[in-house]
Amino acid sequence: MEIRIAEYSDFEAIADLHVRSWKTHYQGLLKQDYLDNEALPDRLVIWQTRLTNPPFNQHILLLEKEEKLLGFICAFGNHDFERGSIIESLHIDPEYRGYGLGKMLIREMVQWIEHYFPNNGVYLEVLEQNRQAIDFYDHIGGEHQVEQLWKAPCGSEVPEFVYAWKTPKLMLASID
């Protein structure tokens, strides 16, 4: 397996995995018509835009095995004045969940955050119904800070939690 930085040519594979992940894990949370008909074109635009002219604080990593995309993670360093850097997306191919791939990607990403934004916190938002992810974030020392509503691209409002770590160093120590 190889972790590498995403390139422009990866946007279609990232969008495809993003939508497959949503279809697997967000059924009943996002409108079915959106998942079936609008999610892929929407995600293609998002990822193409992000990879066309990325801001300096954006970092996207891919996890591949024999050129097959198994997962990706996207973060924005120093995204929020109070909370710090956000891990904005983490998606693993549904067929490969449960093998520690998310942990591998998070570790690599937090090392990047620690290198470039060491004095800020790290946070992420996770849907309330994503119990597997919530259990993992609890296990690695995430502080459950806030409950809020995610205004999904389909117009739904979905309950989510904000998890935070005071520094990337603390998050790394909890992962290892």
Image: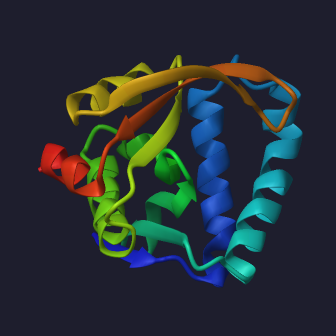
Image-based side of 21 in relation to 97, left or right = right
**Location of residue 157 in the rendering, given as x and y in whole percent from the top left corner:** 77, 21
Kindly identify the residue that appears in the image at 70 percent across and 16 percent down: 28
Q: Nearer the viewer, residue 11 or 61?
A: 61
When the figure is inspected, residue 89 is found, relative to residue 145, above or below; the finding is below
Image color mode: rainbow
Which of the 4 image quadrants contains residue 44? bottom right
Which of the 4 image quadrants contains residue 56? bottom right
**Location of residue 173 in the rendering, given as x and y in whole percent from the top left corner:** 13, 50
Q: Nearer the viewer, residue 84 or 15?
A: 84
Q: How many marks?
A: 0
Image-based side of 153 in relation to 23, left or right = right
Kindly identify the residue that appears in the image at 47 percent across and 64 percent down: 69
**Location of residue 50 in the rendering, given as x and y in whole percent from the top left corner:** 70, 70
**Location of residue 31 in the rendering, given as x and y in whole percent from the top left corner:** 82, 24
Quick one: quadrant of the N terminus? Answer: bottom left
When the figure is inspected, residue 105 is found, relative to residue 158, above or below; the finding is below
The answer to whether residue 142 shows anywhere in this view is yes
The answer to whether residue 66 shows anywhere in this view is no
Q: Nearer the viewer, residue 31 or 58?
A: 58
When the figure is inspected, residue 33 is found, relative to residue 67, above or below; the finding is above
Image-based side of 34 in relation to 115, left or right = right
Q: Nearer the viewer, residue 145 or 124?
A: 145
When the figure is inspected, residue 24 is found, relative to residue 121, above or below; the finding is above
Kindly identify the residue that appears in the image at 81 percent across and 25 percent down: 32
Kindly identify the residue that appears in the image at 30 percent across and 66 percent down: 114
